[in-house]
Image (cartoon, rainbow, N blue to C red):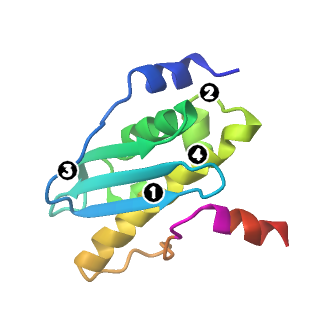
Amino acid sequence: MYSEKVMDHFTNPRNVGELENASGVGTVGNAKCGDIMRIYLDVDDNQIIRDVKFKTFGCGAAVATSSMATELVKGKTIYEALQVTNKAVMEALDGLPPVKVHCSLLAEEAIHAALWDYATKNNIEIPGLDKPVNDISEHEEKEEY
């Protein structure tokens, strides 16, 4: 059901924890399943993500997507991090079962929320970054209409 990479990131998650004085923090959830994901970014003066941590309350797929998402943005510029999509997270994990795709959406939105927080704190605009939602099920409801 789960790929070896998903199982590896679930049983040995990377970048778990919090960053004190984080440059940006993003928290998103999914009211339908109860998952909550928080991503912390440490961005240097050149707008490169020097460090990233996460805390996730949720299923194994939520932990695995959080872990992989942090790996995908670490060392990247804020603009490169913005390009990390849920599809990229899923591909990096060699796929997710259809019922767990929302976990990858949570990871993408948590990155965007942390970038939004960083941009707000530094009074900058990141082209292409939209104000994130707190609950990704809001996106799902919009798509149903």
Kindly report the distance in space between the C-alpha atoms of the residues bearing marks 3 and 4.
22 Å
As rendered, which of 72 and 97 lies closer to the eye?
A: 97
Residue 89 figure quarter: top right
Under mark 4, the amino acid is: Ser
Please report whichever mark, 3 or 4, sits nearer to the chain's N-terminal start: 3
Which numbered disc, 2 or 3, marks the residue that appears first in the sequence?
3
Q: Mark 1 points at which residue?
A: 110
Where 114 falls versus 13 (above or below)? below
Is residue 45 positioned above or below 120 on the image? above
For the residue marked with disc 1, what is the amino acid? Ala
Mark 1 or mark 2: whose residue is earlier in sequence: 2
Q: What element carries label 4?
A: helix
Distance of mark 2 from mark 3, alpha carbons? 29 Å
The mark that comes first in sequence, 2 or 4, is 2
Counting from the top left corner in percent of width and height, residue 56 is at 42, 43
Instruction: Name the secondary structure under disc 1.
Output: helix
Which residue is depicted at the point 43% across and 56% down?
Answer: 111
Label 3 to label 1, Cα distance in Å? 15 Å
Query: Which labelled disc corresponds to residue 19?
Result: 3
* Cα separation between marks 2 and 4: 12 Å
- Local packing at callout 2 (Cα closer than 10 Å; few below 14, some 14-19, many 20+) is few
Q: Distance between the residues labelled 1 and 2?
A: 21 Å
Asked if one can make out residue 82 in the rendered structure from this viewpoint, the answer is no
Specify start and end residues of the magenta stretch as a single range. Answer: 133-138
Amino acid bearing label 3: Leu
Disc number for residue 8: none
Q: Which residue is found at the position 38% from the left and 53% from the top?
A: 38
Q: How crowded is mark 4: few (under 14 residues within 10 Å), some or many (20 or more)?
A: many
Query: Does dot 2 land on a helix, a strand or a loop?
Result: loop
Q: Are marks 1 and 2 in contact (CB under 8 Å)?
A: no
In the rendered image, which residue does mark 4 sit on? 104
